[in-house]
Amino acid sequence: MTPRFSAPRELACLAFSAVALFGAQLFTAPLASADTKTEAGQHVRIAVDVPYPPFEYRNAAGELEGFEIDLGNILCQRAKLDCEWVVQGWDGIIPGLLARKYDAIMSSMRITPARERQVRFTRPYAMSPKVWVARRGETIDLDDPASLKGLSVGVQRGTTQDNYITERYADKLHIQRYATAADVALDLEAQRLDLAFLNYPVALDALELGKPESQYVQVGPRIDQPESIFGRGNAIAVRPRDKALAAAFDQALDSVYADGTFVELMHQYFDYDLRPPSRK
């Protein structure tokens, strides 16, 4: 005799099958379209950590400006994308992308092995060195542990600067981590820090590094190695499955390099070369 299920169980099985089928359709439909081309006018939300001058900041009217804002707008125009900027703190910027709060990150994010396990990157478009900064008149030798004893250093939390300091100086310096690079600069100015380890462009802007009247000086050389920590350069990050969006940005990036637009824009903001080795 063929086994018979009770009505409630049969209904439960049918309901489960329907839910499973519906869920599978929801799950597989996006995957099927993951490799399709982006559509003209497609709305794309791009996350940016503000303030981070001269890359991104708000002007007196509260509007977003900066090198990456200008570059991003050009890329969106060339890729025929309808882009919207979303301000997001650095600590949660990758989780926000994966949670679909926005579709891309363009905020001086370095390509690193750890991040490549979470997101898909475009080819690099820029690379800025890092620099140690101290108050003028201080005698600090980064290679002499005795001169570092009892000193504190400020870094932006979750950045490659943080990784570098943690790996190389955790046993030599007291590390203080901040939500933004601006907070690092403020605490150095307030003499709550002895050193700061910052992106070179940020140090130039926030602390007027290199100007005769600046109260701050660079300590040691600019740093952009090792690649295992600092990566191959800054790139746009998207979710792993968004191959088409990454390709659209790559094509636009190639075009701004090919016709000189990138270099022209770079010179509007910087007096040094921001191009990564792969773009020179």
Image: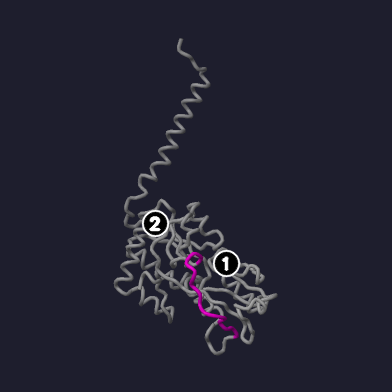
Residue 41 quadrant? bottom left
- Across and down, in percent, residue 38 comes to 33, 54
Q: Secondary structure at mark 1?
A: helix
Q: Residues within 10 Å of mark 2 (few under 14, many from 20)?
A: some
Task: Quickly name the residue at label 2.
Answer: 43
Give the residue displayed 36% in from the left and 65% down from the top: 75
Give the residue displayed 48% in from the left and 72% down from the top: 224
The range drawn in magenta is 215-229
- Across and down, in percent, residue 52 comes to 52, 71
Farthest-out residue, left:
259
Task: Quickly name the residue at label 1.
Answer: 162
Q: Secondary structure at mark 2?
A: strand
Residue 228 is one of the magenta-drawn residues = yes
**Quadrant of the rendering where the C terminus is positioned:** bottom left
Residue 95 drawn above or below residue 180 = above
Give the residue displayed 60% in from the left and 78% down from the top: 143
Identify residue type, mark 1. Asp
Nearest the viewer among 227 and 118 is 227
Identify residue type, mark 2. His
Nearest the viewer among 85 and 32 is 32
